[in-house]
Image: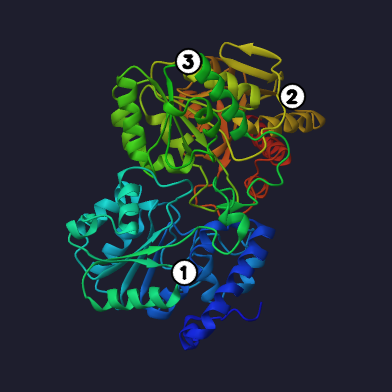
């Protein structure tokens, strides 16, 4: 692997006839390393020649190169001296799967949510910094509204490299996809970019380094905002990825080692069954049909699934319109991406009291995708929304039950679960109103939220060995705060909530505020951006394992005894 150059300066010194061999070497490294450790493969195979051309024309880091969404930055990392980092790609303490400012001065923006690069570029171009500004944006990211807000304001000499491969995670949808296809074929007399006041160059074969270099140099010389339309093929040079119509090679290794059904697969099966019983139920996705599990529903009810592209804000308000029209929409989205549509949840859904169900995949700790992808805010922020009900299932059976309950509610509902194996069903010993009591006990009440129920039960067994009788309860619905849960909690001197979210705004913090005469503690995630690492490793670091919960409860019991004498 020593034939990979180590810096952009070395790359610019290479003769043109050496570039095809370099591109081939880069692809060999990507396939070898990424298929072993996991990561984004197809998207990076598609930008090899494009990234080579970018670093031969522009002088990073003096020239700012901003990638949207950043998952296609592996080639950029190789060309900026990070070959050795691929051995630890997305591992704890290792190289991040997205641009990371701490890794290299060449990574200017930690950009792993889509449709932001053009806004960054607009701001950079207005900042007065030295150097040119380049934004690399995919056709999929252009389906996001922020991209067009930025294009509407772009009047500085920014080079917009439109990497058009016809896909984001899934095929690009809507009028934009049709327009780009017409531009690729040379069939369109109109050009939306020129209509917005930008120059347009292309289409250019993005796998021809010389042609791409020539177009980029021409764009840089214009001294005005320009779109360079570069056409590439996702998965280029690796036959399985090139032939992959369903984007299994977009990211590899993500769940290859997980045994048994995942939370996503349980949802996928159940929402299809609900669709069969409820013809009013429709589903929306923001370019994530298969990752969120909606493909099963789409196979059975293709006319009742709407892919709106990478446009979470539009997805939520479109769902509001569907609900106004008599449908019950289910919006399936990664938990971290619902952050982008919080205003729409509040003002367009909740204010109108509309029956929209949000299914949040990748809630809590997600693992190797890092700080931008951990879904650690939704369960702390969403409870402030009036009338919204939020559910956290502890096992596959409860996911099915709570999903069915959610679509019966005439108002906004949320069901959240992590990226993980779903584990076994955990029966309740009894029911206290709406609360499931998983284990009885007299000294401490452990309120186990969602999939942390199993660790909480194991902690209760360990506490019994230390003479502490711990009950474990699953509230099922964590917002609004349940009267049944509060009544149950009043019977204990110590209540400990165990949650896969940040503590501020968590169920435990709300329970403590509602019960000032009861000692309520919260075991949750720290209020910080968490690094990339395996889910189990990050939960262990936060003390959210059986041993960690047991140790924390013992400390709290000892402190309570000291205070009360």
Camera-nearest label, 1 or 3: 1
Mark 1 vs 3: CB contact within 8 A: no
Q: Residue at x 69, y 36 (%)?
A: 558
How far apart, in angstroms, are the residues tagged by discs 1 and 2?
A: 66 Å
Would residue 469 be visible to someone looking at this image? yes
Q: Nearer the viewer, residue 400 or 41?
A: 41
Question: Along the line of sight, which residue is nearer the eye, 551 or 274?
Answer: 274
**In the drawing, does residue 455 fall left or right of residue 158?**
right
Label 2: state its secondary structure.
loop
- SS of the residue at dot 3? loop
Residue 138 place in picture, x, y as percent: 40, 57
Q: Earlier in the sequence, mark 2 or mark 3?
A: 3
Question: What residue is pinned by disc 3?
Answer: 278
**Residue 388 sits in quarter:** top left
Q: Is residue 270 left or right of residue 125?
A: right
**Mark 2 — residue?**
469
Quarter of the image containing the C terminus? Answer: top right
Image quadrant for the N terminus?
bottom right
Q: Report which residue position mark 1 lands on.
A: 207
């Amino acid at each position: 692997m020593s034939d990979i150059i180590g810096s952009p300066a070395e790359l610019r010194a290479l003769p043109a006839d050496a570039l095809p061999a370099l591109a081939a070497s880069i692809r060999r490294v990507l396939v070898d390393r990424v298929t072993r450790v996991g990561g984004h493969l197809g998207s990076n195979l598609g930008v090899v020649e494009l990234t080579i051309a970018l670093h031969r024309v522009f002088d990073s880091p003096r020239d700012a190169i901003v990638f949207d969404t950043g998952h296609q930055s592996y080639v950029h990392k190789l060309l900026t001296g990070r070959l050795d980092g691929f051995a630890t790609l997305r591992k704890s303490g290792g190289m991040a799967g997205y641009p990371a400012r701490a890794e290299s001065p060449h990574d200017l923006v930690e950009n792993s949510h889509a449709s932001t690069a053009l806004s960054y570029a607009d701001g950079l171009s207005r900042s007065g910094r030295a150097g040119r500004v380049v934004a690399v944006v995919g056709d999929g990211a252009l389906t996001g509204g922020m991209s067009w807000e930025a294009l509407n304001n772009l009047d500085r000499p920014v080079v917009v490299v439109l990497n058009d491969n016809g896909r984001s995670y899934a095929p690009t949808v809507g009028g934009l996809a049709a327009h780009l296809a017409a531009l690729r074929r040379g069939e369109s007399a109109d050009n939306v970019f020129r209509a917005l006041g930008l120059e347009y160059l292309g289409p250019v074969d993005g796998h021809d380094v010389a042609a791409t270099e020539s177009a980029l140099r021409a764009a840089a010389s214009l001294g005005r905002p320009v779109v360079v339309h570069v056409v590439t093929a996702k998965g280029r040079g690796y036959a399985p990825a090139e032939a992959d119509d369903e984007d299994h090679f977009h990211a590899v290794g993500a769940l290859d080692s997980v045994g048994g059904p995942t939370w996503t697969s349980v949802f996928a099966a159940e929402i299809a069954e609900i669709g069969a019983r409820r013809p009013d139920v429709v589903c929306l996705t923001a370019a994530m049909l298969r990752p969120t599990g909606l493909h099963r529903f789409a196979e059975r009810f293709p006319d009742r699934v709407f892919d709106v592209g990478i446009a979470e804000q539009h997805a939520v308000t479109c769902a509001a319109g569907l609900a106004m029209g008599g449908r019950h929409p289910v919006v399936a989205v990664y938990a971290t991406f619902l952050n982008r549509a919080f205003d729409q949840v509040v003002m367009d859904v909740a204010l109108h009291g509309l029956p929209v169900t949000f299914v949040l995949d990748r809630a809590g700790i997600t693992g190797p995708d890092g700080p931008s992808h951990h879904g650690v805010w939704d369960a702390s922020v969403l409870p402030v929304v009036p009338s919204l009900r939020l559910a956290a299932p502890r096992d596959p059976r409860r996911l099915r039950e709570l999903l069915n309950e959610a679509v019966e509610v005439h108002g906004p509902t949320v069901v959240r679960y992590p990226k993980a194996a779903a584990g076994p069903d955990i029966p309740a010993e009894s029911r206290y109103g709406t609360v499931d009591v998983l284990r009885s006990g007299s000294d401490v009440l452990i309120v186990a939220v969602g999939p942390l129920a199993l660790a909480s039960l194991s902690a209760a067994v360990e506490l019994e060995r230390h003479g502490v009788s711990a009950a474990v309860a699953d509230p099922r619905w964590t917002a609004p705060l349940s009267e049944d849960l509060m009544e149950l909690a009043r019977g204990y001197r110590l209540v400990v909530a165990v949650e896969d979210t940040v503590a501020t705004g968590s169920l435990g913090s709300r329970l403590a505020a509602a019960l000032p005469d009861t000692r309520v503690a919260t075991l949750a995630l720290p209020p910080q951006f968490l690094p990339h690492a395996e889910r189990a490793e990050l939960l262990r670091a936060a003390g959210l394992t059986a041993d960690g919960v047991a140790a924390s409860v013992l400390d709290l019991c000892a402190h309570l005894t000291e205070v009360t004498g």
